[in-house]
Amino acid sequence: MEQKTVLIIGAGMAGAEAAAQLAANGIRVCLIEKEPEAGGNVKNWAKLFPDFAVAQDVRGRVFGQLNHPGIELHAGAAIATLSESRGRWTAEDEHGQRYEADAVLLASGFTPFDAGRKEELGHGIYGNIITSVEYEQAILTGRLLTTEGQVPRRVAFLNCVGSRDEKVGNNYCSRVCCINAVKQAIEYKELVPDGEAYVFYMDLRMSGQCYEELYRRAQQEFSVNFIRGRISEASGTIDHRVQLKAEDTLTGLPLRITVDLFVLMVGMEPSAGTKRLASQCGIAGEYGFARAAGTFTADNLTDRPGLFLAGTCKRPLTIPETLADARSAALQIMEYLK
């Protein structure tokens, strides 16, 4: 086994965890990351639901495992091509560097939905309209302010931006947006206890452990207002606030509200690398995600022997699900190499 090499494409949470598991079992790992450093999307997060764990602490525990002599990390190198011949896999990055391995794990992850594609919501057109990722970065730096440098007194959060939306071609649920909106609304109320927080939703999907409890806390302890409704338009006002036009679908009545900050809870889409490599290898699935060989017992496998999948390159997952999936993929790879 110590003579075997596994190529992992993507050094996010899934790639890093799988690399650590494989290296701990004596398998050489070549870990490739397109960004200048390992970290994935979690590096943009301040705290994690449902227990408000500090994201950088969790990230440190996962990525600290990469300091292993059996792991060779190549950052700033996006894989351009991936092919197999006689049981050996060859990848080439954008710089022309070639990598060979006995097996490949695709852990190329997701990218946040581009909110600019929903022009009616005003992102990139009016000030004080940000995405959930930009909100996290503001919390991370301790500067949750309007474009005028003021503390927002009224904030609205909109779920399902880029998810469950036929107009943009994404009919799937991104799994994390509902609970993330609850977490972010609580974070706002902790910062501004006398501020007003509103969460607009189609329906709230609180299916994870402690998710429903956190939703109840948001209402009972932090007075977060939840409105079942769809926002049809967001526009700027003369005093640099944001006016929202919506429908309260419980009462069937139109609703208009002006807020200081409007946060778009953007969903997950497959990354460019996921789309490209899944298509090259003939494993492209719905919406551009990579397709596993089976739902139940072959979720880390593909139709190509030696090519494995882990994490959000397959579909939206939470961080605990991603880490568990990476460990499962590592086990499948070890069985294959034997």
Image (spheres, rainbow, N blue to C red):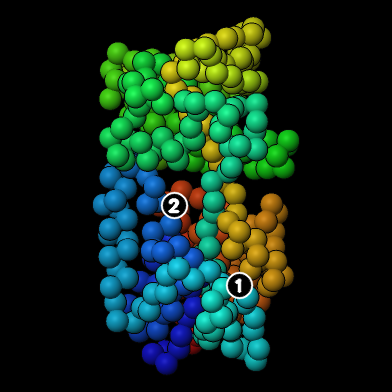
Left or right of 161, for residue 194: left
> Image point 49% across, 78% down: which residue?
7
At mark 1, the secondary structure is strand
Residue 38 vs 237, above or below: the answer is below
**Residue 16 in the image, given as x and y percentages of width and height:** 39, 66
Q: Which quadrant would the N terminus be assigned to in this image?
A: bottom left
Which residue is nearer to you in this view: 226 or 111? Answer: 111
Q: Which amino acid, by three-letter code, is at mark 2? A: Asn
**Mark seen at residue 41:** 2
Q: Quadrant of residue 249?
A: top right
At mark 2, the secondary structure is helix
Residue 56 vs 83, above or below: the answer is above
Residue 69 at least partly seen: yes
Q: Quadrant of residue 35?
A: bottom left
Q: Residues within 10 Å of mark 1 (few under 14, many from 20)?
A: some
> Image point 65% across, 20% down: which residue?
232
Q: Which amino acid, by three-letter code, is at mark 1? A: Ala
Residue 229 at least partly seen: no
Residue 112 vs 189, above or below: the answer is below
**Residue 96 in the image, given as x and y percentages of width and height:** 56, 80
**Residue 310 in the image, given as x and y percentages of width and height:** 51, 64
Q: Which residue is mark 1?
A: 80
> Image point 31% across, 32% down: which residue?
143
**Residue 55 in the image, given as x and y percentages of width and height:** 32, 48
Left or right of 137, for residue 273: right
Which residue is nearer to you in this view: 10 or 24? Answer: 10
> Image point 29% across, 81% down: which residue?
69
| N-term-proximal mark, 1 vs 2 | 2
